[in-house]
């Protein structure tokens, strides 16, 4: 599936859209981390919680649960909700 | 491996040029100031990791080439970067400090790595890290992978002493001042804000509080480590039995084997007080130490007292203190110096360096007798380390 990468994570992927696979959001993030080591821990903490300001969208709809099932045809977007000074 | 903040080779220092390096960690990136051995000419290299909060940037004194940087951004989780070429390239830790996964949920997550300490000289790839919320971690491969260290991260008693995130400093409770005894790698100290001073004699298998003699805020139980707030601990290189401490409630000294701290800050001028964050010790004389007081009255403004910044030195183990303000702003300077943001080199006379919350880097080539400003307009400075290259 296609995964859209936000600007703060481009140092890992070098491009704003990458391919990843997995039957759930959690599996997809493990696949992303396999391809781009370190990217998962910057977005998901050691208790498997999304970090503050990190949001996932699947086919345009916001998803909060990493167990969310995914299909190969889904479009996933990782978004960083920027705030602060 | 990813290569964050990669710098073009033309901006880096040839390794043959021996001198000093000042490692400046800020709220929005890191800078390296390369100086000659005379400490007269400085060349800036940075920013590295622009936009990252860098809480600590430390050069390994055992090889004089490995740099570790504790980094996070406002939106990305915490990590550690490593360089072996003075920042020309950086590699991210494969496994940064992280708490163990709690099987029942609700476990803690590292917000940021706050403190980095190189391990003992006989353990060349060992590093320690302290985090916020408070956790103790160790790497045995030069900072590439990190594991929780000792029992304290998940120990019920230690968790009670650590308190919640609301019990710590405004930007999160911190484990800091990890000290390794140069005579014995199994002898360790650390401090927690809040949570007290702790010591291990068995390589971290067990830790025990070391808070006797320290004061706490009026009305709290002095016997409970939870109410103790050490800001910075330092061990004297030439006398590892002597520790100095800047605490939330004064300046202290401890001479082992005694387990009772003595408040040496009572000899400070009353109008300045003995509250502050950093503590610096002389590399060769255990009687000499420096502090940088701040206003800890009323609502804790955490600025220089009366807007007049000054370091203070003791040359007699804390019996007397002298003000060192020549060259610093005489008035209307409302910054302060954080606990990691002041350090000394090993030259003779000793050079002192500090960074301010207002983004200025100051130095003295004569042990604080005269200060000069090395850099202005940096982001808020979190840490300043000085090392021979």
Image (cartoon, helix red, strand yellow):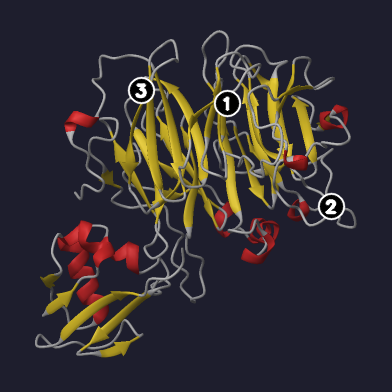
Q: Position of residue B315 (x, y in %)?
A: 75, 15
The numbered disc on residue B64 is: 3
- Discs 1 and 2 lie in a common subunit: yes
Q: Nearer the viewer, mark 3 or mark 1?
A: 3
Q: Is residue B28 left or right of residue A56?
A: right
Q: Of marks 3 and 2, which one's residue comes earlier in the chain?
A: 3
Q: Position of residue B294 (x, y in %)?
A: 73, 41
- Cα distance, mark 1 to mark 2? 30 Å
Classify B161 as above or below A80. Answer: above
Rendered residue at 62%/64% (across/down) = B165
Q: Are marks 3 and 1 in contact (CB under 8 Å)?
A: no
Occupied quadrant, residue B203? top right
Q: Is residue A66 visible?
A: yes
Rendered residue at 54%/24% (across/down) = B363
Q: Nearer the viewer, mark 1 or mark 2?
A: 2
The chain containing the residue under callout 3 comes to B
The numbered disc on residue B217 is: 2
Q: Are marks 1 and 2 in contact (CB under 8 Å)?
A: no
The chain containing the residue under callout 1 comes to B
The numbered disc on residue B181 is: 1
- Cα distance, mark 3 to mark 2? 41 Å
Q: Position of residue B379 (x, y in %)?
A: 47, 47
**Circle 1 Cα neighbour tier, 10 Å, few/some/many (<14 / 14–19 / ≥20):** some
**Circle 2 Cα neighbour tier, 10 Å, few/some/many (<14 / 14–19 / ≥20):** few
Please state which of residues B160 and A39 is positioned toward the viewer in this rendering: A39
Is label 2 in a helix, a strand or a loop?
loop
């Amino acid at each position: 599936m296609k995964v859209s990468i936000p600007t703060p994570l481009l140092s890992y992927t070098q491009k704003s859209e990458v391919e990843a696979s997995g039957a759930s959001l959690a599996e997809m993030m493990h696949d992303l981390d396999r391809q781009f080591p370190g990217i998962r821990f910057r977005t998901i903490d050691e208790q498997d919680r999304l970090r503050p300001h990190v949001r996932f969208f699947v086919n345009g709809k916001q998803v909060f649960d990493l167990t969310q099932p995914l299909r190969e045809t889904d479009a996933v977007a990782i978004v960083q909700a920027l705030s602060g000074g | 491996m990813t290569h964050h903040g990669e710098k073009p080779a033309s901006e880096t220092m040839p390794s043959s040029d021996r001198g000093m390096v000042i490692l400046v960690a800020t709220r929005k990136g890191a800078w390296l100031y390369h100086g000659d051995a005379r400490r007269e000419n400085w060349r800036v290299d940075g920013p590295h990791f622009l936009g990252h909060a860098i809480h600590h940037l430390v050069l390994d004194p055992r090889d004089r080439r490995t740099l570790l940087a504790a980094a996070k951004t406002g939106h990305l989780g915490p990590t550690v970067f490593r360089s072996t070429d003075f920042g020309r390239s950086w590699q991210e830790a494969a496994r940064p400090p992280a708490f163990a996964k709690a099987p029942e949920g609700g476990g803690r997550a590292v917000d940021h790595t706050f403190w980095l300490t190189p391990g003992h000289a006989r353990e060349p790839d060992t590093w320690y890290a302290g985090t916020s919320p408070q956790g103790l971690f160790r790497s045995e491969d030069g900072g590439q992978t990190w594991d929780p260290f000792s029992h304290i991260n998940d120990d019920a008693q230690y968790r009670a002493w650590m308190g919640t995130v609301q019990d710590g400093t405004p930007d999160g409770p911190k484990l800091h001042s990890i000290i390794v005894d140069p005579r014995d790698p199994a002898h360790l100290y650390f401090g927690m804000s809040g949570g007290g001073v702790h010591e291990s004699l068995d390589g971290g298998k067990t830790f025990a509080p070391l808070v006797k003699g320290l004061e706490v805020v009026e009305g709290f139980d002095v016997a409970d480590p939870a109410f103790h707030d050490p800001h910075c601990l330092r061990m004297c290189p030439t006398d590892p039995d002597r520790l100095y401490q800047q605490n939330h409630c004064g300046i202290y000294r401890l001479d082992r084997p005694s387990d009772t701290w003595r408040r040496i800050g009572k000899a400070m001028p009353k109008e300045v007080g003995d509250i502050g964050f950093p503590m610096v010790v002389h590399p060769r004389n255990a009687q000499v130490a420096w502090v940088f007081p701040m206003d800890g009255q009323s609502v804790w403004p955490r600025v220089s007292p009366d807007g007049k910044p000054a370091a203070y030195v003791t040359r007699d183990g804390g019996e007397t203190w002298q003000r060192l303000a020549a060259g610093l702003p005489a008035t209307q300077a409302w910054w302060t110096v954080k606990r990691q943001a002041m350090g000394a080199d090993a030259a003779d006379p000793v050079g002192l360096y500090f960074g301010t919350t207002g983004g200025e880097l100051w130095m003295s080539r004569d042990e604080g007798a005269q200060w000069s400003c090395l850099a202005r307009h940096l982001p808020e400075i979190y840490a300043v380390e000085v090392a021979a290259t």
